[in-house]
Image (cartoon, rainbow, N blue to C red):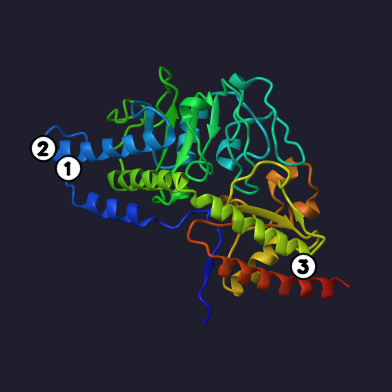
Amino acid sequence: MTARSYLDWNATAPLRPEARDAMIAAMDVVGNPSSVHAEGRAAKGLMERARAQIAEAFGASGADIVFTSGATEAAALALAGRDLAAAGIEHDAVAAWTSDGLAADAEGRVTVADPAASTLQKANGETGVVQTLPAGLAVSDFTQAFGKIPVSFAWSGVEMALLSAHKLGGPKGVGALVLRQGLDVTARIRGGGQEMGRRSGTENLIGIAGFGAAAEAAQRELADGTWDRVAALRDRLEARLADAAPDTIFLGKGAPRLPNTSNFAVPGWKGETQVMQMDLAGFAVSSGAACSSGKVKASRALLAMGRDETVAGSAIRVSMGPETTEEEIMRFADAWEAQYRRHKARAA
């Protein structure tokens, strides 16, 4: 039986060994980080080490990192009660709190007229398109960018940023809101006043330890050029598919993109069908954001880019990682091309 190939890294990245080791070690730390005795101080120290690891990797101050249950909670903490403009390319966790006041062009790029009243993601999880963020932007979703491309919160000019551990090889169920120094937010979860009064509840120490270790490992990968190799793989895949299927549309290819992401469509060949066909062939890919899985509908992000229902409903995303091999990518191309030929024969 052929081994399965995981090509859905933007939905969630495999857990890094460094994160797993840090989480296992944290399981043996018995204290509550809020307790003042030796065991509590040990737990607190472990949590603050992780906070420092994330701050170092993200170019932020540890004192301005608020741990949450994920980027969705971080979005609610940053956006609830505000009236910020956003484009239709944003993740549902951001779209739930914002209004459609910004427009994306055909490549998925967004221009912001009033940064202080707007939110704009750093990179799109479906197309991989990377945005140029304006100074003074109120909020930015960095979940897909952090760990895949060099970023620095201090240099970004953004007031608040959203992060998620599992997008860079940390555990699921932990994230962070990062605040510009001197800013604050109104707590949505109230109680014991943890996280400097910004988010009550005993912190997820095990998840936070894994998040810190993953961020540190991701920073090392960026420094050693690992993602340049991934980008070269992505480019070889796209060249192969374009040669085999000239009617393929590569979404966002005319803009800067994440090194690991390819979103493409053959108009009329439903994305959901392709995902199932590739799954049966042993490949995990997706037809949109993971939060929308099971919903058979056209991509909201692609519609916001001006694509019609046919194209938006025909797109699939392949997202790779440092562990992805050229052999896996070529096997995927073989399997996809075989299904493409069948699709064209049926449509004839």
Residue count near mark 2 (Cα–Cα under 10 Å), binned few <14, some 14–19, many ≥20: few
Location of residue 233 (image quadrant)? bottom right
Tell me if residue 172 can be seen: yes
What residue is disc 1 on? 31
- Using the numbered discs, state the Cα–Cα distance from disc 1 to disc 3 in whole angstroms: 58 Å
Q: Position of residue 184 (x, y in %)?
A: 42, 21
Secondary structure beneath dot 3 equals helix
**Disc with the residue nearer the chain's start (1 vs 3):** 1
Q: Is 208 left, or right, of 26 in this rendering? A: right
Residue 229 or 119: which is nearer the viewer?
229
Left or right of 44, for residue 114: right
For image coordinates 43% across by 23% down, the residue present is 185
Q: Amino acid at mark 2?
A: Ala
Q: Is there a contact, CB below 8 Å, between mark 3 and mark 2?
A: no
In the depicted structure, whether residue 188 falls above or below residue 125:
above
The CA distance from mark 2 to mark 1 is 8 Å
For the residues carrying marks 1 and 3, which lies nearer the camera in this image? Answer: 3
Q: What secondary structure is found at the residue carrying circle 2?
A: helix
Q: Disc 3 or 2, which lies upstream in sequence?
A: 2
Tag 2–tag 1 contact (CB < 8 Å) = yes
What's the residue at 17%, 34% (across, down)? Answer: 35
Quadrant showing the C terminus: bottom right
Q: Which mark is residue 244?
A: 3
Q: Which residue is mark 2?
A: 38
Which amino acid lies under the numbered mark 3 shown in the image of this protein? Ala
- Going 59% across and 70% down the picture, which residue do you hit? 279
x, y (%) of residue 133? 60, 29
